[in-house]
Every structure is written in structure tokens, then in C-alpha cells.
Amino acid sequence: MGPSATDREDTEVAESQIAVHWREEDYYYPPASFVEQANASDPAILERFGEENFPECFEEYAELLNWDKRWDVILDTSNPPFWKWFVGGRLNASVNCVDRHLETSADKAAIVWVPEPEDQETKTMTYQELHDRVNEFAALLQDFCRVKTGDRVTFHLPMLPELPVSMLACARLGVIHSEVFGGFSGAACGERIADSQSRILVTMDAYYRNGELIDHKAKADEALARAQEQGIEVDNVLVWRRYAGEYHSESPMVEGRDFFVDELLAQYRGKKVEPVSMPAEAPLFLMYTSGTTGRPKGCQHSTGGYLSYVAGTSKYYQDIHPDDVYWCFADIGWITGHSYIVYGPLALGTTTVMYEGVPTYPDAGRPWRIAEKLGVDIFHTAPTTIRMLRKLGPDEPGKYDYKFKHMTTVGEPIEPDVWRWYHEVVGKGDAVVVDTWWQTENGGFLGSTLPALQPMKPGSCGPGVLGIFPVVYDEDGEVVPAGSGRAGNICIRNPWPGIFQTIWGQPERFVETYYAKYCRDESSNDWRDWPYFAGDGAVEAADGYFRILGRVDDVINVAGHRLGTKELESATITVSDIAEAAAVPVVDELRGRAVEMYVSLKPGIEPSPEIAKAVTKAIETEIGKIARPKNVWIVADMPKTRSGKIMRRVIAGISNFADVGDTTTLANPEIVDEIRRYVQNEKMNRGEVPRELSAQEKEEIAAFGRAE
Ligand code: 6R9
């Protein structure tokens, strides 16, 4: 007798753990000039953060902050996996990011903001000004909106200094902020308002993107309508204005509900608000991210643990000193911006640069002009931006007189070739590069190199960071040894202060998604029994460096942004003619991955270009333009298992001109050739045939949909 269908499915899983072959890259070493000034240049730090010193080692991070009361317990594991850090301690995040720097650095630039239009002036906000503005806005929230400690306030703010001011004002009051990426649609914002039960939405009338002043307030109306459908009424919409006193939106202001912040602030000029001393374990903010089911996950981050972790990693991995000019070219609407534009750099009292717009506006020399003008010495961005700048302006960096000592890459795997351009051309061969692997859930870096002590290796993030002990497990929980050349699931064996506390309102999903898979004993309160499952595939080289291969669940990483396949599919089936939908990733030269949608229609409906357009529109409305599919394929049926599940890896294989794997277990194997002919012919006509995929990319495509 041959193997049963289930046996064969197991074999497929095993196939996704095949050996991954690539050329071992050479090491690159930091220049002596960097090592001399680095915050971490004594190898003793590696011992201080060794496993035998866990969890005490993290006191070193907590001691970077000012506490109103020192903690009694470093790590409380009594209710796993809901770890508690620095229990008994009290502090305020806005005091740590602002007030405590006033004594020495009141006149120093805290935030330097660069507007997108190049003829508009760069604005500098000193620590004193930041303090004043945070207090005034906190006074407004407290007095006018009557928010209390523990309430949630949603922001849908673009990259203007009003965003960090709003975050720190909430932090001052112990109010939990939940920033939704400005590029997300009104509907996506509304879902997050409803999930977090926010009564207040803070937004802005308009902002610049690619040379255009876009109407943003309009999205607030859609957001409120969506929240209302889910039973949540928002009391007030606070509208900051891109130009104080001028309104640049078509959306009417609703009497008694919508208010211009600049007008309201007139009553609060010069007001000071006593910071609320918060328990270390009080939530500081929520940051939503995508998962395998449709409902977004509100990752809840703590005050004491989170702030300690971002301060510590900013100091040692970003190598931030108070006199650096640090520019993280991310959007604060993502975790990178929260941790490494706002909280980490400001906790260390440095100058953090914010830029309003797109990297290539008006041309691909813009980032380097900004760097030259402001004297940026630490630069932080994502592979997608690096690829785009390389494509559009490969020689631009050489034309500008800036000097980076340090550069970061984050958000997706970086191809060694792209890494080398970043190092040689952007970094002029002189800057160290840190590749930082981590996630929204993690608060801060998990895998990276300590820049003065550990050499760089293109395409690998490096070993676990200080106090983080990663391991690669196979599907059965056996360790995949370093140097074996085999891939598996990367996990973190221990808790750390930056780990999120739970998924807002969904504690069971928190346990299920991140801990159930490899928990050794559910009744144990020893952290060693609770490895954290990150959801990424990885390979550990003989030197202990990790190469991250991408997601093992149904999440598509587009330009560094996680999009859930289920979210894309739910948005698609809001188009009434559509019966079924499946989202798959395609390799994209600039964005890393792009989304392709496969849809089948309800009986009696004829395929038409209008349906494909309606799908794109629905995705833009429900999620946002970043999720716009590269192609929408209307097919007669989807390849399915006998139990009726759509086999996403098969269509992912077709879209990428890759192997579709074993199709003998399908209920309708004949459909595969039909779809392949149609899709691949179309792609050839459109000039969309991808280059030969790397072993790593092939593996990712073959494993796609494994979580189903
Ligand atoms: C910080 C952030 C997390 C997912 C993560 C992984 C991918 C992030 C990476 C990387 C390879 C890196 N990822 N950094 N892959 N190398 N340096 O990006 O958070 O938006 O939650 O995305 O991004 O797949 O699981 P988030």
C-alpha cells in the first residue's frame, strides 16, 4: 500500500526543511575609527550578557532609565508565558525621553523634521520645545478629552513631529497609544479603533507624499463609520493641521465631534502636566500587525521592559551617543519607528531626524542631500528602500559630502549584492552595517552583530543579540544544529524585557500563536519550557550567525510590511462576484515580495477586467495602497486538497515560475496546468518573467501556506 494522503502531507512539510545551499559570504570588519568610539567595544559585555547571567544582565538596560521606584523582581515567571519584567518598579516614559534631558540639553535638538517639499524649511524642535508641546497636548487630552490612565487613543498620523508629541503626551498620562500607519486605509484604521475600543482618534488634515498634498482627514470619516459598524463610537476626532490655521481637506469638520488641535491648544499654552508614575508592567502602546487569521493583532508593549530594551539596544547596536545625528528612515507607523525613531533615541537624549515623504522625491539623491545638510552620522533603513535607491540613483551617494559611521538594515532579508552596494556606495566603504532581525512583537532587535565586536556577514543578521538565545527547531522540536545547512523554525529560548505582553483582548491567541508550538510543559513556570516561536524560517551557520529565510506562516512581507493573506482574501471577497480568493507572494525586484491575488467567480459570472479592478479597489479600501496586488488572476477553480483547502504553494509556484511540488494529493490536479498556461503566458506577454530564483527564495515559495 502506498502512503496515505496525510503521510504525503507530512512529506511535504519535510520538504520545506530541505538543505539550503548558498555561498558562505566573507566577513567584513569595522574600521578602527569606529571601534575606538563604540559604546560596546570591550568583549566583556558578551560575558555580562551570557546565559549564566540571565535575567540579571538586563538590569544594565533598566539602569539606563530614571525610575521613580526601583523594581523588586527582575523577571516574574509565575504566569507563563505572560512574563513580567522589573516588577514593583515605577517610571514614566515621557520623563525618560524628555524631562530628564532638560537639565543638560534643553537647547539641544531633539527632533529635526524634514518636510517633503524641498523648498520648505527643516524644523528643529529642542528638548525644551518638545517638553512644552508634550505637556500642552497632554493637558488637552486630559482636560478636553477627559482621557484617563489606561484608556486607549488611536492615532492615524503621518510623519510629522506632531506624532511623537502625541505619543509622548499619552505616555505622560499613562494613556495607551495605538498608532495606525498613515498609509493604511480609513477602514483598516476603523478596525483598529474598534479592536482597541478607542474613544479618541487623533489625525491630520493632509500631508505630502510624492509631491502631492494628500487629503488624510477623509480617512477619519471612513474609520469612524467602520468602528461604528462594530459598535464603537468615537467621541472626538482631534485634527492636527499640516499648516496651522489652514485646512487642506475636503472632509467637513463635524460639529461637536471634530476639533482642530491648533485651535484647542490656545487654551493650554504653557500648561504643565504632572507625569503619572506608572508601574513597569503598565502597557505603553499597542502596535497592530498581521497574522494568519483576518483579525489584526494588537501587540501590547510594556512601559518599563520595553523602554529599557529599546534604550539598551539603541545604545549598543545603533551605537547612539548623545552627540550623534541619527536618522532612521522608517515610518513611525511601524514598530521600527516607535522603537528606533522615538523611544530609543529620545531615551538616550540624542537628535532624531524625521522625514515626511518618499525617499526618491524629487529624485534619488534626496536622502543623501538630507544627510549632508544635517550631518547625519547614523543611518537606518530597509532593503526595499536600498534597492529602490540603487536602481534609481546608483551613483548618487558619491555626489554628496556626508559621512556615515553606522548604517542599519531592517524589515526583510537583504540580498548580499544589495548589502554590498549599501556598504560600498552608501557607506563609502567606511560605515559599519548592522542587519537587525526582529518583529513588531519583540519591541527591539533579536538578531544582529555588535558592530565593534562581531564582524558583518552580508545576508546574515548575525547571532542573537545580547541576552537573546535563539535556536532553530525542526517541526518535531529537535534542534537543527548550527552548520548543518538545514533550515527550520527560529525560536528564542528565553524571555526578554522588550517582548510584548499579550495580544490586546486575545490572550489565548497570544499563547497559541507564539508559544503552543514548542512549549514542553504547559504546567511549568520555568521559562526554559517556553521557547518563543517567531514564525520565521532560518538557517544557523557554523559561526552561530543566522540567515533569516522569511515567514513560515501566511504572511507576505511587502517592502518590509507584513500583510496577512487572510486579510487580503477577506478584502477581496467583499467584491460580490467573487466566490473564492487566495493571496500569494511573488518575488519583486524592488519590494522584495509583491502580492498576487487568485480569484474564482460565482456561478454564472463572466470574467472581466472590471472584476480585477474591483479587487484592487477593495484591497486599497480595506487595507491600503501598500497592499495593492501586482496582478489579479481570474481562474476557473483553485487547486484544492481533497478536504477542500486551497493549496497556496501551488499557485505561488506558478506565479513565480517555480516548481509547484507534488500535486498528486490534489482533488483537481488537472487545474494546475490550466492555471499555469494562462498565468505564465500572460506574464510573458507583460514582460513579468522573474529572474531565476535563489535556493532560499525557492524554499520560501515551496513552503508558502504551510500554516494552513
Ligand atoms: C522590525 C520589523 C517582522 C518580519 C520578521 C521577518 C522580517 C524583519 C528582518 C527580517 C530578515 C531582517 N524581518 N527584519 N527578515 N532579515 N533583518 O520588521 O517588524 O514589521 O513585524 O516584520 O519581518 O520575517 O518576522 P515586522
Image (tube, rainbow, N blue to C red):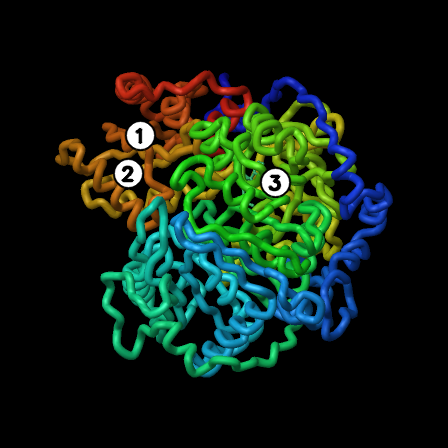
Question: Mark 2 is on which residue type?
Answer: Glu
Q: CA distance from mark 1 to mark 3?
A: 41 Å
Q: Which mark is residue 466?
A: none
Q: CA distance from mark 3 to mark 2?
A: 41 Å
As helix, strand or loop, the secondary structure at mark 3 comes to strand
Which quarter of the rendered image does ligand 1 occupy? top right
What residue lies at 36% left-to-right and 19% top-to-bottom? 689
Camera-side residue: 456 or 530?
456
Left-right relation of 103 to 133: right
Q: Which mark is residue 408?
A: 3
Q: Are marks 3 and 2 in contact (CB under 8 Å)?
A: no
Camera-side residue: 514 or 240?
240
Q: Which residue is mark 1?
A: 638
As helix, strand or loop, the secondary structure at mark 2 comes to strand
Question: Mark 3 is on which residue type?
Answer: Thr
What is the x, y in percent for residue 620? 30, 46
What is the x, y in percent for residue 37? 77, 44
Is residue 343 positioned above or below 67 on the image?
above
Residue 380: image quadrant is: top right
Is residue 1 positioned above or below 413 on the image?
above
Badge count: 3
N-terminal of the pair, mark 1 or mark 3, is 3
- Give the mark toward the camera: 1 or 3: 3
Q: Are marks 2 and 1 in contact (CB under 8 Å)?
A: yes
What is the x, y in percent for residue 699? 52, 24
Q: Which residue is mark 2?
A: 580
Left-right relation of 570 to 138: left
As helix, strand or loop, the secondary structure at mark 1 comes to loop
